[in-house]
Image (cartoon, rainbow, N blue to C red):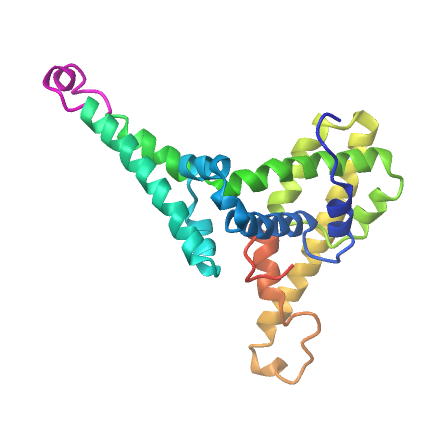
Amino acid sequence: MKEQLYTIPVTDAFESNCECPLCKMKQELEKNAIEYTLGPSYMEDDNRAMTDEQGFCEQHIQKLYSEKNRLGLALILSTHMAKVTKDLKKQTDSGSTGSSFLKRKNDTSGIGTYVASLQRNCFICNRINKTFDRYIDTIFHLYKKDSTFPEKIITSKGFCTYHFALLYDRAPEFLSKDTLLKFRSDLQTVYFTNMERMQEDIEWFINKFDYRYQNEPWKNAKDALPRSILKSHSTITPDIQL
């Protein structure tokens, strides 16, 4: 493969007994990216240029604010805001001349497009996704080359719905016909079996709010709600431990 393989974090996630190994990998990547962003790297010109250009999504700016390095975040935001202000001023100045305005009065200014691009961009998301894509490559590589890896998938607790679909749809890019059929069969089995398990857990959680079941044991349902949120919606927030 062209890119580096990340076998250790992938196998560790599949051996962790979590509800979705891919969510766990992504959660760890997010933690590392946040630490990197607010670590010594924010003083490096190359990194500051990227944070100035890309900014952060709403989710990650909140998580950065929750960290202890408020000065580091302030420095990052200071130069990011300066760049955005400069870019917007340049665009508004160029569009405010009379002839230009009359010529383009029916056209969009480009300001909305620029701001929308900021909203779609995030230094931390981009850093996560770059490595996560290699993790996906590694999963299929291990499925083909490591005879023990298919068993790790089968004996796992399955995947969230989002990552089930991602693996199912990406599989033809990496696997030949026979291997593809087996992989998808394994994937379907482990996903639907564990979704049934989760359904039983959440229904028992609901039952425990009925007085008729108040003296019954909780079984595996005490944390069924956060696990169901993960299974059905996918998450990389630290509030739901994987």
Residue 40 versus residue 165 in the image, above or below? below
Query: Is residue 50 found left or right of 103 in the rendered image?
Result: right
Q: Can you say whether 236 is above or below 208 in the image?
A: above
Is residue 221 visible in the rendered image? The answer is yes
The quadrant the N terminus occupies is top right
Q: Based on the displayed image, in which of its 4 quarters is residue 221 positioned?
A: bottom right
**Which residue reaches farthest bottom?**
215
Name the spot of residue 89 as percent of width and height, x first.
Answer: 23, 31
**In the rendered image, the vertical position of residue 163 relative to residue 108, given as above or below:** below
- Which residue is located at x 81 percent, y 52 percent? 155
Q: Position of residue 48 (x, y in %)?
A: 45, 39
Residue at 16 percent across and 16 percent down: it is: 100
Of all residues, the one furthest to the left in this rendering is 98
What residue appears at the point 71 percent right and 48 percent down from the top-left corner?
191
Q: Is residue 23 left or right of residue 187?
A: left
Camera-nearest residue between 207 and 28: 28
Total numbered badges shown on the rendered structure:
0
Whether residue 182 can be seen here? no
Q: Quadrant of the C terminus?
A: bottom right
**Residue 6 found in image quarter:** top right
* 125 inside magenta stretch: no
- What residue is at 54 percent from the left and 56 percent from the top? 237
Q: Nearer the viewer, residue 202 or 6?
A: 6
Examine the structure image and report whether residue 107 is included in the region drawn in magenta. Answer: yes
Q: Nearer the viewer, residue 209 or 61?
A: 61
Which x, y percent locates residue 132? 63, 40
Q: Position of residue 183 (x, y in %)?
A: 78, 37
Q: Which residues are magenta?
A: 95-108
Is residue 34 shown left or right of residue 218? Answer: left
